[in-house]
């Protein structure tokens, strides 16, 4: 994947998660929900001078305060871990979800400052009325170049929830599955918790390479 595209687009996904609860959004239609929130995100980014100036603390704070209201990050983490999820204790599962979520926020929050004049074009939703798992496909024009950005959602009693994202042909869940599995197979679930925790500390202190 190309990092110059990857970072701003993942940041837009995290911002989508963070800012969504500030507005009333119809969650009964997956494509309408994505379109509405994405536009709110772009407007919010452009109107906040602290985000535009790259204030990492402000960006992280905003994302943290509105924790993933229209996503199911536990579902995301379960899919990333695969069969290893059931080998973890409930406490380990909780810690992995929280640390993984924080890792993504801290890794990509700074990229919000790079979002400037992106425009989003949406492809027609290919889904049947009774489908419970769909993909909303879009193309982001980034400095005149089209970048694929797709969201995978599933239907819950509370409405549609995002649980995966695809940037340039790479799905978030697939990108982390091998890394998590190797860490667990070599050192165990508890070591994965420690690895994620340590990585977050490094990012928070600015010492991460």
Image: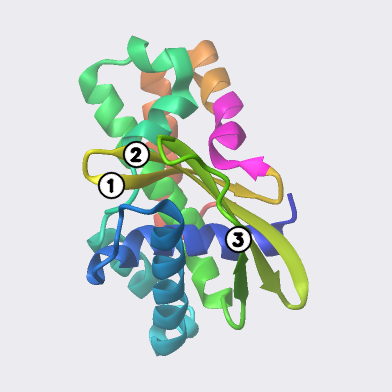
Q: Does the magenta portion include 17? A: no
Residue 102 in percent (x, y) is at 37, 48
User: Does 17 sit left or right of 183 as displayed?
Assistant: left
The answer, for residue 188, to whether it is visible in the render is no
What residue is pinned by disc 2? Answer: 155
Element carrying mark 2: strand
Quadrant position of residue 119:
bottom right
Chain part drawn in magenta = 170-179
What residue is pinned by disc 1? Answer: 159
Residue 106 in percent (x, y) is at 43, 56
Residue 181 in percent (x, y) is at 54, 19
Element carrying mark 3: helix
Residue that appears at 25% across and 30% down: 94
Residue that appears at 58% across and 65% down: 8
Residue 7's label in the rendered image is 3
User: Does 91 sit left or right of 198 as displayed?
Assistant: left
- Give the Cα separation between the discs numbered 2 and 3: 28 Å
Residue that appears at 45% across and 74% down: 39
The answer, for residue 183, to whether it is visible in the render is yes
Is there a contact, CB below 8 Å, between mark 1 and mark 2? yes
**Can you tell which of label 1 and label 3 is closer to the viewer?**
1
Task: Give neighbour class at mark 2: few <14, some 14-19, many 20+ (Cα, 10 Å).
Answer: some
Q: Main secondary structure of the magenta part?
A: helix
> Residue most toward the right?
145
Q: Nearer the viewer, residue 77 or 169?
A: 169
Task: Give neighbour class at mark 1: few <14, some 14-19, many 20+ (Cα, 10 Å).
Answer: some
Element carrying mark 1: strand
Q: Does the magenta portion include 174? A: yes
């Amino acid at each position: 994947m190309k990092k110059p595209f990857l970072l701003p687009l993942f940041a837009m996904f995290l911002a989508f998660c963070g800012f969504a609860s500030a507005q009333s959004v119809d969650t009964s239609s997956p494509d309408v929900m994505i379109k509405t929130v994405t536009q709110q995100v772009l407007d919010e980014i452009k109107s906040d001078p602290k985000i535009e100036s790259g204030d990492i603390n402000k960006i992280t704070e905003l994302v943290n305060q509105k924790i993933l209201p229209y996503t199911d990050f536990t579902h995301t983490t379960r899919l990333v871990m695969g069969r290893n999820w059931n080998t973890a204790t409930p406490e380990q599962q909780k810690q992995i979800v929280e640390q993984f979520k924080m890792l993504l926020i801290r890794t990509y929050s700074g990229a919000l400052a790079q979002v400037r004049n992106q425009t989003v074009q949406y492809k027609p939703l290919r889904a049947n009325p009774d489908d419970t798992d769909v993909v909303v496909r879009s193309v982001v024009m980034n400095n005149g170049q089209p970048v694929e950005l797709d969201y995978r959602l599933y239907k819950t009693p509370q409405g549609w929830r995002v649980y995966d994202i695809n940037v340039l042909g790479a799905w978030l869940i697939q990108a982390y599955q091998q890394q998590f599995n190797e860490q667990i197979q070599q050192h165990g679930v508890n070591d994965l918790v420690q690895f994620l925790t340590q990585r977050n500390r490094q990012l928070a202190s600015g010492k991460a390479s």
